[in-house]
Amino acid sequence: MRADLVPGATFPDLELPDHAGNVRRLSDLGGADPLVLTFYRGWWCPKEQAYFRRLVAFQDEVEVAYTRIVSVSVDSPEVEAAFRAGIGARWTFLSDAERRYQHELELLETTDRTHDPYVPTVFTLFPELRIHRAYNGYWFWGRPTLEELRRDLREITREIRSDWEPPPP
């Protein structure tokens, strides 16, 4: 991972095709809400399938809490659309099939020369794409648990929502 992708830094505003082939900008997808950004190996990886099943179970909470998830891989939009539908995900998947950002972000999985995938990495981001926390998921246990994501999203939301505390009577 690039050395400057640390808490407090601004994450690059990626622009990639989504699972439907529409070009999307990361800042537009996040809007004014906290964002969970996942880079993953691909649909074929059993670790990704296990992790994404957890994220699918989490998506109802994410949606009602004014939060977004975006996932990025080197799979084509068509493959991402099939994976997304197959697991029941409702969030946006972005395709970096041309590996435009993989090298720039230094997130190349160097041990898999067959697929040349992203190294699994998760970022929790503030709305302006400021990094709150980064997780190295090369080993499965390095990925954030749902409880860690809840904690991160609570901390981000508390900071960005002026109405975090209820108004006095």
Image (tube, rainbow, N blue to C red):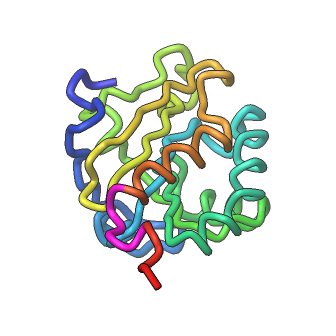
Predominant secondary structure in magenta? Answer: loop
- Relative to 153, residue 99 above or below: above
Instruction: Name the residue located 46 percent from the left edge and 17 percent from the top edge.
Output: 110
Quick one: 149 or 90, which is closer to the camera?
Answer: 149
Quick one: 151 or 44, which is closer to the camera?
Answer: 151
Q: In which quarter of the image is residue 2?
A: top left
Q: In this view, does 142 lie to the left or right of 22?
A: right
Q: Is residue 82 left or right of residue 125?
A: right
Q: Quadrant of the N terminus?
A: top left
Q: Identify the residue at the far top of this view.
A: 111
- Relative to 66, residue 96 above or below: above
Q: In this view, does 48 lie to the left or right of 23?
A: right
Q: Identify the residue at the far bottom of this view.
A: 169
Residue 125 horizontal/vertical position (percent): 37, 50
Residue 132 horizontal/vertical position (percent): 36, 41
Instruction: Name the residue located 46 percent from the left edge and 58 percent from the top edge.
Output: 94
Instruction: Name the residue located 56 percent from the left edge and 69 percent from the top edge.
Output: 65
* Bounds of the magenta segment: 159-164
Quick one: 64 or 19, which is closer to the camera?
Answer: 64
Q: Is residue 89 left or right of residue 92?
A: right
Instruction: Name the residue located 50 percent from the left edge and 52 percent from the top edge.
Output: 153
Q: How many labels does the image show?
A: 0
- Relative to 39, residue 160 above or below: below
Residue 134 horizontal/vertical position (percent): 42, 32
User: In the image, is residue 80 part of the stretch drawn in magenta?
Assistant: no
Residue 147 horizontal/vertical position (percent): 66, 41
